[in-house]
Image (tube, grey):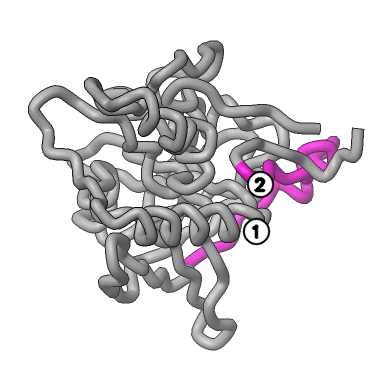
Amino acid sequence: MSSEPSDEIQGGHEIPEGHGIPEGMSPDARETWPSPELIISWLGDQEVDFEFRPGEDVAVHDDPEAVYAARRFRDVLGRFASGVTVVTAISNDAPVGLTCQSFSSVSLDPPLVLFIPAKTSRAWPLIQRSGKFCVNLLGADQAELSNTMASRGTDKFAEVKWSPAPQTGSPLLDGAIAHIDCSIHSVHEAGDHYVVIGRVLDLITDDGVEGSDADLDPLLFYRGQYRTTDPR
């Protein structure tokens, strides 16, 4: 089973032809320009902030070998299947969040996890300012929620049901298969990203809720597509 993200991976839209290609690019260059689907697979932890905007500078590589190496790196790394999370926090009394594939456990003692936001992320500075966050592990039926949180909308939470985490108040997204509530332990620069280490304060699941087993199938992302563990 798979579901392909769409334009700015917002549900209900298709990626328009030529989306994400700089205006004025030659036909030959357009042939080799990465597709939006591939860009999504590369930038799943960056709020899918890849579109070009009038007046903004666009970095261009003049070295074809460098371009190939970067694309090869991203393509190969895109073959590593991952889960999908939404990292949330409360900043300035309002909920903020970003979709993030780059998430992992780090340590059992003390309990630490990490996620890796892009330096271009708009949500990350707000999360950092709050000093705490919650990692929501998405279920197989939450691709639309992933798309919403990956968009650049000003009010991502308008139609999203959530409740405050007991420890930090960070949003617990309804329907997520688990929630990992954290304080920010440390932040490290890593190229064009930050590695954020979180100290786990609370682990929240709905295992005791009748019928919750049906929601434990995780949402996966592999080679530019949402997938699940269902073989159908």
- Closer to the camera in the image, 132 or 61: 61
In the picture provided, is 197 more to the left or to the right than 188? right
Which secondary structure lies at badge 2? Answer: strand
Amino acid bearing label 2:
Tyr
- Closer to the camera in the image, 103 or 216: 103
Query: Is-magenta flag for residue 3?
Result: no
Neighbour class for label 2 at 10 Å: few (<14), some, many (≥20)? some
Residue 227 in percent (x, y) is at 73, 39
Residue 60 in percent (x, y) is at 22, 46
In the picture provided, is 140 more to the left or to the right than 50? right
Which residue is drawn at the image coordinates 30% and 44% (left, top)?
Answer: 90
Which residue is drawn at the image coordinates 77% and 45% (left, top)?
Answer: 216
Q: Name the residue under label 1.
A: 80
**Dot 1 and dot 2 residues touching (CB under 8 Å):** yes
Q: Give the range drawn in magenta.
A: 201-223
Which secondary structure lies at badge 1? Answer: loop
**Residue at the left extreme?**
55
Which residue is drawn at the image coordinates 77% and 50% (left, top)?
Answer: 207
Give the mark count. 2
Q: Name the residue under label 2.
A: 222
**Does 26 sit above or below residue 96?**
above
Give the quarter of the figure containing the N terminus: top right
